[in-house]
Amino acid sequence: MSSTLLVPKLVTVLREGYTRQQFSKDLLAGIIVGVVALPLAIAFAIASGVKPEQGLYTAVIAGFLISALSGSRVQIGGPTGAFVVIIFDIVQRFGYDGLAIATMLAGVLLILMGLARLGAVIKFIPYPVTVGFTSGIALIILVGQIRDLLGLQMTSVPSEFLEKILAYGEHLGSTSPAAVGVGMTTILLVKFWPRITHRIPGSLIAILATTAAVAAFNLPVETISSRFGPVPNSLPMPRLPALPDWQLLTQLFSPALTIALLAGIESLLSAVVADGMTERRHRSNMELIGQGVANLITPLFGGIPATGAIARTATNIKNGGQTPIAGIVHAITLLLILLFFGKWAALIPMPTLAGILVVVAWNMSEAHLFAKLLRGPRGDVLVLLSTFGLTVLIDLTVAIQVGMVLAAFLFMQRMADATQVGFVSRELNGEAEEEDSNDPLSLRWRRVPKGVEVFEINGPFFFGAADKFKNALGDISEPPRVLILRMRHALTLDATALQALESVYEKSIKQQTLLLLSGVHSQPLMVMERSGFLDRIGPDNVLGNIDDSLNRAREFLGLPLAPPPQSFTPTVTREKG
């Protein structure tokens, strides 16, 4: 029940009573996470095609709102790598105002999802789809850093993946040894510094060391200031983006939906990871609402899309963060850094940020999971590779849509394959299923009158299995006097399967065959009742079990009724006459 509450965890914490001991732990964790978030916020903004300070604005505003309204006690929000591809594409096509409108639309969608209690549903995104587009995004981020990592002299970089690779190849001769040295030093520091200590993030050490080295030795390396100019040391005043015309607004809806889905998926994944580390439960619907409000407000301050960040949330927990106050402290820490040290951020070398993002991309790719899925079922491999390939070569929106459709078709095929249909009464002379040997309701223990056929549906009876059902019934060479459809293992029934039942009923009327339904569950029974099929077939012809169904058949045929079986000796026979 608690997972469906629309109450922020911050309210719950304050109601429980917030102690000084909790605050001291949250304060330390929040400061550490704020320092960790600083280079990531700047790097993600630059990789997304916007100004570096816009990443800081996002980390401050969205970070504060997500923690204040989150359905998780320890969620840390801000810009993440998952958005880099979609943000870059929107900015290239519609400019920043287009991105702001799409982000605000996504915020509204997330709020509506939370109010509609879709927090549990959105977590059912198939795993191959998630790994596919996440690995694709990681590859795009990695390739996008080659220019700065190698210091290539390029006035512009193509947006298309293959064109970008070709352009890099043409400019390899302009590689800067100084940039390569700074970039590789950053990668090594970020990767191996945790072996020394986890208290101070390796990305901060890399920034301080490489920025000092570039300034001290006057290395010919491009910096944030040389490309973007000075970094402001204040938050901008809120501003509404320029409203586009209706046609442009409709074009922005698809990217907005993608942003909403990504924000929902990543934030809930982060909350689930946090639950595993803290042994608590998050409120998924409140989490979506919190993410929605953050993405609705942040663009007013020049920010970009934000969501819960798994790595920063884990860092918060590992450093003692216990409540949303830690996330609020993280946002305040970033604000203070922006106000008092923002101008110094302009000195950060571009290869340093590229090196940090290379490590982020590698961690994000989860290459071991990708390789593991490649050894899985062929259908899952198809979904994985399709989503991955479309993310890299076409578009993230298309990749998610196609991946979801393929996964849905794969699921339907597997469900249809799991549904078994056939004539059980034709097994009378052969070997019945082994698992029926201990089933007291098995047909093995009953006498089936001549002229009666028993047909069993075993599994979900939906449109994927309806064709199999009709084909199996089409094998009847001579219409029986009574046809019993046994549905004790069919827990669900949809409109297509109902239409197949109606076709069988109409055909049975023409052939003067009595149609009986046996062991119908509540959901199929409700569907039949609402559609009027139950009245058509007659309530007397819908029986609770196979014994009642066989006796109803005997009554129709003018045969004496049989008592229920007293023992379960495996003697399967058919009555004569």
Image (cartoon, rainbow, N blue to C red):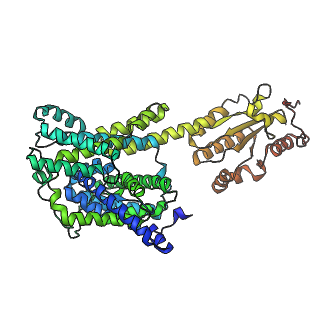
Q: Is residue 301 visible?
A: no
Q: Is residue 29 visible?
A: yes
Asked if 150 appears above or below 37 in the picture, the reply is: above
Q: Which quadrant: the N terminus?
A: bottom right
Q: Residue furthest top?
A: 430
Asked if 331 appears above or below 209 in the picture, the reply is: below
Looking at the picture, how far across and down is residue 477, in whole percent?
A: 71, 28
Residue appearing at x 38%, y 54% in the figure: 315
- Marks counted in the figure total 0
Asked if 266 appears above or below 145 in the picture, the reply is: below
Looking at the picture, how far across and down is residue 541, in whole percent?
A: 77, 48
Looking at the picture, how far across and down is residue 157, in whole percent?
A: 16, 42
Q: Which quadrant: the C terminus?
A: top right
Looking at the picture, how far across and down is residue 488, in whole percent?
A: 72, 44
Residue appearing at x 42%, y 57% in the figure: 317
Q: Nearer the viewer, residue 507 or 364?
A: 364
Q: Quadrant of residue 513?
A: top right
Question: Going by the image, does 500 lie left or right of 487?
Answer: left
Residue appearing at x 49%, y 74% in the figure: 15
